[in-house]
Image (cartoon, helix red, strand yellow):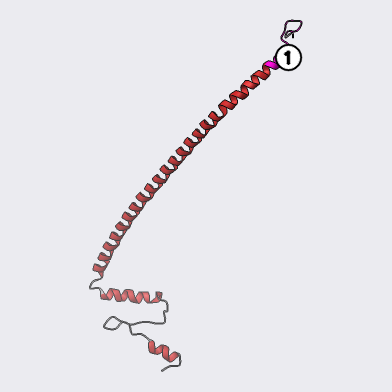
Amino acid sequence: MNLRNERGEASEFLLVVVGIFALALLLAGGCAVGPIYRVWEQKLAGQAELNRATYNRQIAVQEANAKFESSKLLAEADVERAKGAAQANVILGNSLKGNEDYLKYLWIQNLEKGTNPNVIYVPTEAGLPILESTRHLVNQGGH
């Protein structure tokens, strides 16, 4: 069998044999490298998933810390508002002591803002209003 043609070049048969041999080597190498590549790829995927989980956990911790700090500051703000309201109540209470005439004036001014401006409750000596329970009974056919 002559592997060279008339001009001394390798024949097509030799090229086909070399090609088949190279293809066989590639297939054998692929079979040997394939499982190793899959293991390496899974390892990288696992590392990426672990990094993602670690990052997500850090985000959750940071969010929880922010909420904690925010709730502490809001609570402190509520305490300060309560202190201010308490001080305002003390000042207002002290300013109204001994000013019964002024309180009566305010009461009269606010009668117009009541739910029923036609009904007026007059306080007695004890500071309690006289209720109109008998008027309602009369209007409903009672006494």
In the picture, measured across the screen, residue 92 lies left or right of residue 141, that is: left
Q: Residue at x 45, y 41 (%)?
A: 53
In the image, residue 134 sits, relative to residue 67, either above or below, namely below
Point out residue 71 in the picture as x, y percentages from the top left corner: 36, 53
In the rendered image, which quarter contains the C terminus?
Answer: bottom left
Q: Residue at x 75, y 7 (%)?
A: 5
In the image, residue 10 sits, relative to residue 66, either above or below, namely above
Q: Which residue sits furthest front?
A: 1
Q: Are there few (<14), some (14-19), or many (20+) residues within 10 Å of tag 1?
A: few
Question: Who is closer to the viewer here, 56 or 7?
Answer: 7
Q: Residue at x 30, y 76 (%)?
A: 104
Please identify the quarter of the rendering in which residue 128 is found: bottom left
Instruction: State yes or no: residue 110 in magenta.
Output: no
Q: Which span is picked out in magenta?
A: 4-17
Point out residue 92 in the picture as x, y percentages from the top left corner: 27, 66
In the image, residue 66 sits, relative to residue 118, either above or below, namely above
**Residue beneath label 1, please?**
13
Q: Residue at x 37, y 74 (%)?
A: 110
Please identify the quarter of the rendering in which residue 124 is found: bottom left
In the rendered image, which quarter contains the N terminus?
Answer: top right
Point out residue 66 in the picture as x, y percentages from the top left corner: 38, 47
Q: Which residue sits furthest top?
A: 7
Question: Who is closer to the viewer here, 26 or 1?
Answer: 1
Instruction: State yes or no: residue 9 in magenta.
Output: yes
Point out residue 90 in the picture as x, y percentages from the top left corner: 25, 65
In the image, residue 73 sits, relative to residue 46, either above or below, namely below
Element under disc 1 = helix
Please identify the quarter of the rendering in which residue 37 is found: top right
Tag 1: residue type?
A: Phe
In the picture, measured across the screen, residue 96 lies left or right of residue 26, that is: left
